[in-house]
Image (spheres, rainbow, N blue to C red):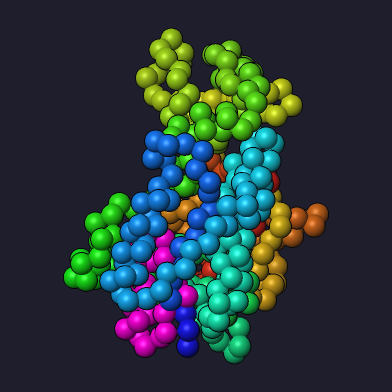
């Protein structure tokens, strides 16, 4: 069976390629360029990543293909990212990138190259029961990436392999070191490539206009001006730059709400009850296998790395309503809510509002 691995120039995909070779597959690799750098100061490290990917491919003795998906990424991921921010929401481009680029554009490209399946360095597992594919959490709870993969469908899962799903990150580093990979000690990439280490607000301001408004506290007291609701997210602490003279305590300030109609940013001090909600409405549900029957008791994550929370899903006015057993902090419209039963990822939806 021929497998083409998405070789990113990082340690995870390097080890994934090695494991597949050891399992007896015919392996080739593909490096995807998904962003045309508009800077020269190292925010997006595509050139270094390509160099590292080539070194790993050479060491493994496998062919490395390269492809530029930048236009696909712009059309299918980045424009949606900007559109959501314009609405004052906080999208998750990594979820869309997996659905549209890594498991659509890359998958189609690889199949055209004669691959039977593709593989990536994601920490997740795929099983098949009674002809139905299931997405399961990776065994390394600290690295599990099923949250970002919840939009995959049956076809995409049937054509994918996740060799790292059964092992943990420490073991991956150990394997890379033992095989003298140039990526063995390479720092994990964090965030989105096109933003990198840049200030998020400054990056967005190159694409979105400033729309100044008021930052107010829960009593309506004016604190200072903001540059635009698009540049803030629910629960945000850093970057508010609220100095002394406001509030009765020295506790930090957090964004509690974005009032689109009045263009006001509501901030609260400390662990305010205004940061917590017990339910939310969500749209565009995607179920990996069969659509469940409602009401459904399960677990959910409203952000990556959050511990799964007990909840009940129901249908209300043709929308999904999720009610949590415990109030949740900083539920954020535009983000994904992802549902689980034990270690099986059921799918997810887009958070619209919270109550």
In the rendered view, tell whether residue 92 sits above or below residue 125.
above
Q: Position of residue 338 (x, y in %)?
A: 57, 59
Can you tell which quarter of the image residue 204 is in?
top right
Query: Which residue shows up at 53% across the image and 49% down it?
Result: 35
Query: Which residue shows up at 61% across the image and 71% down it?
Result: 108
Can you tell which quarter of the image residue 55 is in?
bottom left
Q: Is residue 338 visible?
A: no
Query: Which residue shows up at 49% across the image and 34% down it?
Result: 200
Query: Which residue shows up at 28% across the image and 71% down it?
Result: 59
User: Which of 73/36 is in front?
Assistant: 36
Q: Position of residue 141 (x, y in %)?
A: 37, 63
Q: Residue placed farthest to the right in the image?
A: 317
Q: Is residue 280 magenta?
A: no
Can you tell which quarter of the image residue 241 is in?
top left
In the rendered view, tell whether residue 285 sits above or below residue 38.
below
User: Which of 237/228 is in front?
Assistant: 228
Q: Is residue 42 left or right of residue 214?
A: left
Quadrant of the snapshot with the C terminus: top right
Span of residues in magenta: 4-27
Q: Is residue 61 visible?
A: yes
Q: Position of residue 10 (x, y in %)?
A: 35, 59
Q: Position of residue 256 (x, y in %)?
A: 56, 31
Q: Is residue 25 magenta?
A: yes
């Amino acid at each position: 069976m021929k497998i083409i691995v998405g070789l990113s120039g990082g340690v995870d995909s390097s080890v994934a390629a090695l494991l597949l070779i050891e399992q007896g597959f015919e392996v080739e690799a593909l490096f995807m360029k998904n962003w045309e750098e508009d800077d020269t100061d190292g925010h997006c490290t595509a050139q270094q990543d390509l160099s590292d990917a080539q070194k790993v491919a050479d060491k493994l003795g496998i062919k490395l293909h390269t492809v530029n998906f930048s236009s696909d990424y712009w059309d299918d991921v980045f424009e949606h990212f900007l559109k959501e921010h314009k609405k004052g929401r906080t999208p998750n481009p990594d979820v869309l990138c997996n659905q549209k680029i890594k498991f659509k554009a890359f998958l189609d490209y690889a199949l055209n190259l004669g691959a039977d399946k593709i593989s990536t360095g994601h920490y997740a597992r795929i099983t098949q029961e009674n002809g139905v594919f299931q997405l399961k959490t990776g065994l390394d709870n600290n690295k599990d990436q099923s949250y970002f993969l919840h939009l995959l469908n049956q076809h995409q899962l049937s054509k994918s392999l996740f060799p790292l799903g059964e092992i943990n990150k420490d073991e991956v580093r150990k394997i890379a070191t033992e095989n003298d990979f140039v990526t063995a000690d390479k720092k994990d990439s964090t965030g989105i490539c096109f933003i990198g280490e840049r200030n998020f607000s400054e990056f967005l301001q190159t694409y979105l206009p400033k729309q100044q408004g008021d930052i107010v506290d829960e009593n309506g007291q004016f604190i200072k001006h903001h540059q635009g609701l698009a540049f803030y997210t629910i629960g945000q602490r850093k970057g508010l730059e609220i100095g002394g003279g406001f509030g009765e305590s020295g506790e930090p300030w957090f964004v509690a709400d974005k009032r689109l109609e009045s263009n006001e940013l509501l901030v609260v001090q400390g662990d305010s009850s205004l940061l917590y909600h017990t339910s939310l409405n969500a749209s565009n549900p995607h179920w990996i296998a069969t659509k469940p029957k409602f009401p459904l008791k399960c677990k959910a994550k409203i952000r990556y790395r959050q511990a799964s929370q007990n909840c009940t899903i129901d249908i209300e006015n043709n929308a999904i309503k999720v009610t949590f057993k415990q109030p949740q902090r900083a539920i954020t419209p535009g983000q994904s809510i992802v549902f689980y039963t034990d270690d099986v990822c059921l799918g997810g939806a887009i958070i619209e509002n919270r109550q």
